[in-house]
Image (tube, rainbow, N blue to C red):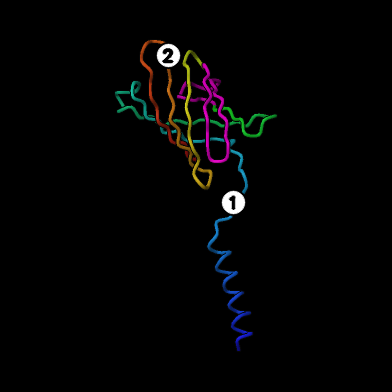
Amino acid sequence: MIKYLFRYGTAMMTILFMTSCVLEEGDPDLSGSWTCTETSEIFLKSTKGTSTFQVNFENDISIQDKYYIDNFYNLGNGNRVTIIKSGYTISIPKQTVDGFVFEGSGELNDTYDMIYMTYTADDGGGEVDHVTAEYAR
């Protein structure tokens, strides 16, 4: 009897352990279309500072964790910001795109389908825009 309890108990514990763990699906590619909901402190005051638009993430050919976001800050297609992904963390190195200096950071959720970023946009006019953005696919 004890032999059967041990055998079935071990099997049940293994099943419970396997179903309670969330298995990491690797490091998914972020390439593709995302919907960005962006809140700005300075711009878009007529819409309470929030706008929603499409962006496209493109993976760098030679560096796996380097991406380009096309239409970043709703600047239009062809205006790309470079980001670096490290696990669940995103960094936006300081860079100039279409007259704006961008810099910031962010994080991905556990399932890699939401990204939360905060960054600054400086057009050199004396006011720096502080932006929060949520990207969803």
Q: Quadrant of residue 134?
A: top left
Q: Which residue is mark 2?
A: 123
Residue placed farthest to the top in the image? 125
Q: Quadrant of residue 18?
A: bottom right
Residue displayed at 58% across by 77% down: 9
Left or right placement of residue 37 versus residue 83 in this view? left
The verdict on residue 85 being magenta is yes
Q: Nearer the viewer, residue 54 or 45?
A: 45
Tag 2's secondary structure? loop
Relative image position of residue 42 (x, y in whole percent) = 34, 21
The answer to whether 45 is drawn above or below residue 57 in the figure is above
Residue displayed at 58% across by 27% down: 68
Relative image position of residue 52 (x, y in whole percent) = 41, 32
Which mark is first along the chain, 2 or 1? 1
Residue displayed at 51% across by 47% down: 110
The verdict on residue 84 being magenta is yes
Q: Nearer the viewer, residue 134 or 90?
A: 90
Left or right placement of residue 96 versus residue 61 in this view? left
Residue placed farthest to the right in the image? 62
Tag 1's secondary structure? loop
Q: Give the extent of the magenta segment.
A: 70-96
Residue type at mark 2 is: Asp
Relative image position of residue 77 (x, y in whole percent) = 53, 22
The reply to whether dot 1 and dot 2 touch (C-beta < 8 Å) is no
The answer to whether 27 is drawn above or below residue 54 in the figure is below
Residue type at mark 1 is: Glu
- Give residue 24's mark: 1
Relative image position of residue 14 (x, y in whole percent) = 60, 69
> Around disc 1, counting alpha carbons within 10 Å, would you say few (fewer than 14), some (14 to 19), or many (20 or more)?
few
